[in-house]
Image: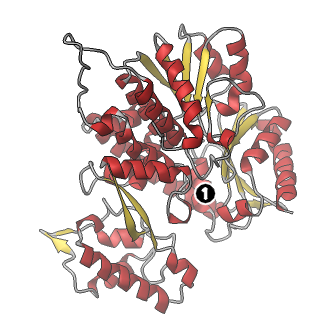
Amino acid sequence: MAGPVPELEDRAVACAKRLCEADRVLLASHIDADGLTSAAIAAQALERAEIPFETVFEKQLDEDAIAAIAATDYDTVLFTDFGSGQLDVIGEYEDAGAFTPIVADHHQPADRDTEYHLNPLLFGINGASELSGAGASYVLARALADVHEPSTAADGGPIAGPAGTTARADNRDLAALAVVGAVGDMQASGGELHGANEGIVAEGVDAGVLETGKDLALYGKQTRPLPKLLEYATDVHIPGVSNDANGSLRFLDGLDLELKRDGDWRRWADLTNEEKRTVASALVRKAVSSGVPAAKIDGLVSTAYVLSEEPVGTELRDASEFSTLLNATARYERADVGLGVCLGDRDGALERARQLLAEHRRNLSNGIDLVTREGTTEEAHVQWFDAGDEIRETIVGIVAGMAMGNEGISRSKPIIAFAAKNDEELKVSARGTHSLVRQGLDLSVVLGEASRAVGGDGGGHDVAAGATIPSEQKAAFVDRTDEIVGEQLT
């Protein structure tokens, strides 16, 4: 089998063979959208390979979490969307014979390796922009389908799977979840997925579970009524439409379209292709006449990733909306709900996820308002704020990223956000921009080095990273981050 990412093929096959040798497996995964899709891909691949497993989620894979995993009676542990950065600790338990780790991750590895380590960074592929944790999990799933020898029926033939399709037999149907994970991990820079992700997209399209094409780069095309779709579309600010309820209504009223049906506003997903072109063209003309720069106008169009087997008009149809729904479950300690949605629960789990999403949006809005109102403290090379217990530590990083560019909050410096984790510790989240990364910023290095210098720990990606530090070390941590960022950007 030629896998979706040839560079990872040999390592993926070795990991898959080791999984097939296990009597049972403990699957441990991160809880964000990328972690949930990673777990869902791995869970389905293990089930199809007839390997018994149990799933656990960790908000942070720290020493206590690894010790708890080691205390179980599982001899084989599959880590997805984390594990690479913690290999120094995991390795100690491996050396002691506690368990054999198999890691499918894309984060910066610690200064130690292990035999069954599937990470794009080990093979010259950028884990922050070219392959997500879900992508690594998908590569493993494809290899597992190839390595696994199906059980035989009484007549000596293979037992047919529930779907019996080629795509399901070789796990290509799981490409849709891998794309949701990549989009949720902010890897669609410039409006589309790049690098190794492209191979996964191609397999999803070929398997019939994905559709791609150019479309308006607006969030909510499946679910938001047209006026709200335009009002809330602020990535490219169009005067008289963006953040303007009456303005968006006036804009739509000026178009020769059937905007309502049976008394309800239509959504973008309800429009015909010709109607979509009418709205898009009018929007571009509005942007031009309002003086929006040409480079910004180009950002109105991006590649859409549509899950073709999901119902039109639902969050699950659009990769971006699906990933946001999953993030909402993760940030409120309900990873079980997010996993249920990924695994096909369209009743209880989906309804609960939608409730959590509504709560998530309220909390994000309140958090962004707070940060914009209070502003940030500017250092020479970074800006920061401390939300205390006013913003949940599980969403403070999202708030920081969304607040960048608001009045008084610069996009020319990375933003560092603090929130109370407990009485003794602070959660730290850092966000940058792809422009800063091109200039040399690597927040994974910044937060890793700065947190360890003050007795904490952290890591992540070049454009987004996190850490936990002792509360009393905040000032020293800020000084160290400012110093490291200064070194990177000069």
Q: Is residue 394 visible?
A: no
Q: Quadrant of residue 393?
A: top right
Question: What's the residue at 51%, 77% (across, down)?
Answer: 298
Residue 197 location (% of width, % of height): 51, 50
Question: Is residue 231 rendered to the left or right of residue 350?
Answer: right
- Asked if 83 appears above or below 382 in the picture, the reply is above
Q: Mark 1 belongs to which amino acid?
A: Gly
> 10 Å neighbourhood of mark 1: few (<14), some, or many (≥20)?
many
Residue 83 location (% of width, % of height): 63, 30
Q: Nearer the viewer, residue 177 or 205?
A: 205
Q: Quadrant of residue 194?
A: bottom right
Question: What's the residue at 30%, 49% (across, down)?
Answer: 208
Quadrant including the N terminus: top left
Q: Quadrant of residue 328?
A: top left
Residue 318 location (% of width, % of height): 36, 55
Question: What's the residue at 23%, 66% (across, down)?
Answer: 270
Q: Nearer the viewer, residue 65 or 93?
A: 93
Quadrant including the C terminus: bottom right
- For mark 1, give the secondary structure: helix
User: Which residue is tagged 1?
Assistant: 401
Q: Residue furthest bottom?
A: 289
